[in-house]
Amino acid sequence: MIRSLLVANRAEIARRIFRTCRELGIATVAVHSDPDAAAPHVREADAAVRLPGAAPADTYLRADLIVKAALAAGADAVHPGYGFLSENADFARAVTDAGLTWVGPPPEAIEAMASKTRAKDLMRAAGVPLLAPLDPDRATPDDLPLLVKAAAGGGGRGMRVVHDLAALPAELTSARAEALSAFGDAEVFLEPYVEGARHVEVQILADAHGEVRSLGTRDCSLQRRHQKVIEEAPAPQLPDELRHALDEAAVGAARAIGYRGAGTVEFLVGRDGRPYFLEMNTRLQVEHPVTECVYGVDLVALQLRVAEGEPLPAEPPRPRGHAVEARLYAEDPARGWRPGTGTMHRLALAEGAGLRVDSGLADGDDITVHYDPMLAKVIAWAPTRAEAVRRLAHALERARLHGPVTNRDLLVRALRHPEFQDARMDTGFLERHLKDLTATDETTTPLAALAAALADAAQRPGTVAGRLGGWRNVPSQPQLKAYRSEPDGTEHEVRYRLTRDGLIADDHPNTRLIEAGPHHVVLEVNGVRRAFDVAAYGTQVCVDSPLGAHAFTALPRFPDPTARTEPGSLLAPMPGTVVRVADVAVGDRVEAGQAILWLEAMKMEHRVTAPAAGVLSALHATPGRQVEVGAVLAVVNET
């Protein structure tokens, strides 16, 4: 029996595993980097051990330090979570060699699936359908489009789609460099890119007594940069014959490598309905909650049971209803999925009544450049798919998210898109509809800015706001307040007067003030009452209402004349590390959109490109240099 469990991970997945441990009466041990010293997963654990440093390579990827931490804290088992060392066979061996219980598959099974190229050879021999690899030197135009893929790792790193053979050599070089940086392995391979395909996976469970069973399918087709964003179970609109074939292939794959524990076998399903093996993840998946909701099981508890040598329950669980999960990220989809950093002042998401939230953050926590920018997973369950989708979209829409920009609006619009609601989505959905999903809606922004200005006025000394539009102790002369809407940068000037007879506001002729306070404003617009909640954090102002969420930066009355940069400057869009610089030098001519350098931040690489055609007049970036947001990396003089 496991008595004390160390989770070799952080944030959301560590908290998720701790929750099950508390229910089972198992003591918990956390590990943490220096930036995570006060993180929720550390505060919730019974014991915590520091891993000195900040970068994952110095902390959560140090197998030796984690094993020492487990022994020092008196843990008798280790759960790897997902990511980091979860699919590292050497780490699994180090855990068992130290006399600890490994909550995961045998190291040999991890090794069998660690390399996608070796895994495909294994699956081919087991009769699992898959895409045939291509020789880069023999690729022809008839083979297009092509997919360059890293043999190790995952999460979209080292992956490139090629539509032009002339671009293949450069994409291979780029993918190898990214794969080496991310996984320490530069091996990549080439295969056909299946356009219009769905990403469907099968959850499997296996014990040490020969039982291997499927817990149904999940659809993970909505992806950005080959990383999943919205997942659901069961995968909708799959013919029974195909569903059965996927179950059989997944169970066959697990049996072929002597698998134990929870794992996932991933497939592409083409427009013709043919499935192709992608890879097997020898760990718990980020999207496991949708399967738990549909089957009424606790996958972490089952992992622990298998690790203790127990058989799976004799009676397989039966599916019920439908579940959909959305990954809420601190990122800006409209600007190249740029990740955000800073303080998450408020993260309030509804739970209960078919809703579940798995998060690694609490109000006031910082989002740093060192880790993935996922804020939370929001999961909705309902008897039908349509009800689950509606419930999830509504919960996201009403969430209070005060801090860096998030992908919340994109998630809500994607869930309500006709193609998604009719289950006609594929892996190209987000890219195909990105413009519409990220379009700025300016119809309600001016009204939200007015609410922000009135809330600001209500907290000034000597100003008393009443109900039904009555104000006293206020100047009647025109007032001006300026805001910049985030993240699009649009500036709004709010001009208004507060009189004993009520509100007089430019650009809002049919608006009546009902109530105003520092945190709550009620306006009547064309006879309809609208309530706005307002929260200020320094110069950042967040306005929430049923009309939508808006974030503003309050602008000073007199702008700082020194806050300017040289025209053509390439600024760091986020804090990060320069990982590569293009083969360019000062004095070279560059074209608009040409990549000048690559920044690594939050487990992703980001290209920094020339804003216009011109001459590179300055280059301040070198590989390995750490930069802060707004740092000048290069300058292009437009010609």
Image (tube, helix red, strand yellow):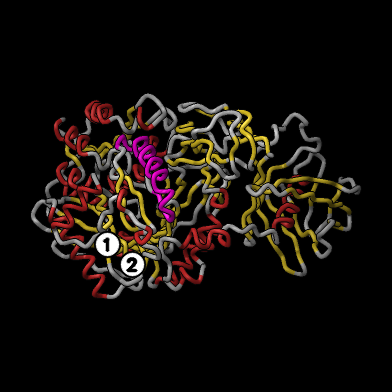
The magenta span reads 160-185
Q: Is residue 345 above or below residue 74?
A: below
Residue 6: which quarter of the image?
A: top left
Assign a secondary structure to mark 2: loop
Q: Which mark is residue 276?
A: 1
Q: Which residue is at a point 72% across and 33% down the rendered structure image?
A: 564
- Answer with the quarter of the image where residue 21 lies: top left
Q: Main secondary structure of the magenta part?
A: helix
Residue at 31%, 70% (x, y): give it. Answer: 320
Q: Position of residue 585 (x, y in %)?
A: 55, 29
The answer to whether residue 470 of the structure is visible from this angle is: yes
The reply to whether callout 2 and callout 1 are in contact (CB within 8 Å) is yes
Amino acid found under the numbered disc labelled 2 = Gly
Visible residue check, residue 503: no
Q: CA distance from mark 2 to mark 1?
A: 8 Å
- Taking 590 as reference, is 470 left or right? right
Residue picked out by circle 2 = 270
Q: Is residue 76 left or right of residue 147?
A: left
Q: Name the spot of residue 165 as percent of width and height, x first.
A: 40, 52
Q: Single out the residue that lies furthest toward the top.
A: 52
Quarter of the image for the N terminus: give it: top left
**Between 469 and 140, which is closer to the camera in this rendering?**
140
Task: Return the x and y of residue 435 as percentages of the image width and height.
Answer: 57, 59
Does residue 600 appear to the left or right of 293 in the view shown? right
Secondary structure at numbered mark 1:
strand
Whether 133 is among the magenta residues is no
Q: Residue at x 44, y 72 (%)?
A: 386
Graded by Cα atoms within 10 Å as few (under 14), some (14 to 19) or many (20 or more), the crowding at tag 1 reads many
Q: Is residue 519 above or below residue 27?
A: below
